[in-house]
Image: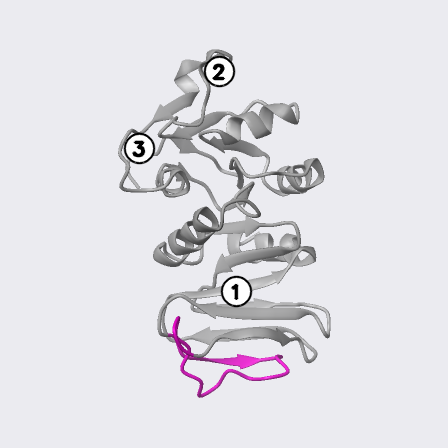
Amino acid sequence: MKNPFVQSQVPVTLVGGAPLESDRLQESLALAPFLVAADGGAARAMEGGHTPRAVIGDMDSLGPGLRAQLDPATVLEIAEQDSTDFDKCLANISAPLVIAVGFTGARLDHELAVYNVLARRRAGAGAAVVLGTHDVAFHAPPALRLDLPEGSRVSLFPMAPVTGRSRGLRWPIDGIGFAPAGRSGTSNEVAGGPVELDLDGPGMLMILPRAALTQVVRTLSGG
């Protein structure tokens, strides 16, 4: 990444424009204190009493009154319409990890576009975690180990053809060919002990209960 607009040594909270409960924003900020907004997400942040340290997007949702309250040096306007604001933000943030809040629960096409971006970006360090009201979702790296409670829900959703192996899941994934229009791995669960995944390629989204957020952030950011 060349000369990213945002450079942070700590995880970043990225706020979108979808409905957002204050406790979800606070939960994210406790783990990712550097606050960035995607376009109209600045309004969501400021409604909660937080001024973003940067605002990135095409600015079609950021009203002139709100924009006037921001330091112009903190606003990056990208006019092109070939990418979403979420994509624009991730392309201009350098940080150990991004927690994206305010990107779920509104328009379905916008939410699907978020998962499309997750799947197209490199998994692992510098990754993004989408925090919803009930779930967290992220692009699983090639090798992953998480300590999750027995019986905890683990869903795997392929955004590309993917195969791999697992340990610690009630229904192992070994020998299964996953694909967007084929087999998915939703509603699996932890059988006991750590969950370990070894994936043969990119494109697998992992969806866990919201309670797993802290561990996911620590694991993906190397903390």
The magenta stretch spans residue 157: no
Residue 70 spot, x, y in % from top left: 48, 15
Q: Residue at x 39, y 55 (%)?
A: 116
Three-letter amino acid code at the position of disc 1: Met
User: In what element is the residue under mark 2?
Assistant: loop
Labels 1 and 3: the sequence-earlier one: 3
- The residue under label 1 is 206
- The residue under label 2 is 70
User: In what element is the residue under mark 3?
Assistant: loop
Q: Residue at x 31, y 29 (%)?
A: 78
Q: Residue at x 44, y 57 (%)?
A: 124
The magenta stretch spans residue 179: yes
181 vs 106: above or below: below
- The residue under label 3 is 3
How many numbered callouts? 3
Q: Within 10 angstroms of label 1, few (less than 14), some, or many (20 or more) residues?
A: some
Q: Residue at x 56, y 58 (%)?
A: 219
Horizontal side of 3 relative to 220 (left or right) equals left
Quadrant assignment, res 23? top right
Question: Is residue 50 visible from the viewing direction of this image?
Answer: no
Horizontal side of 153 relative to 65 (left or right) equals right
120 vs 68: above or below: below
Q: Nearer the viewer, mark 2 or mark 3?
A: 2
Query: Mostly what secondary structure, the magenta segment?
Result: loop
Three-letter amino acid code at the position of disc 3: Asn
Q: Within 10 angstroms of label 2, few (less than 14), some, or many (20 or more) residues?
A: some
Looking at the picture, tell me which residue is in the foreground, 178 or 96.
178
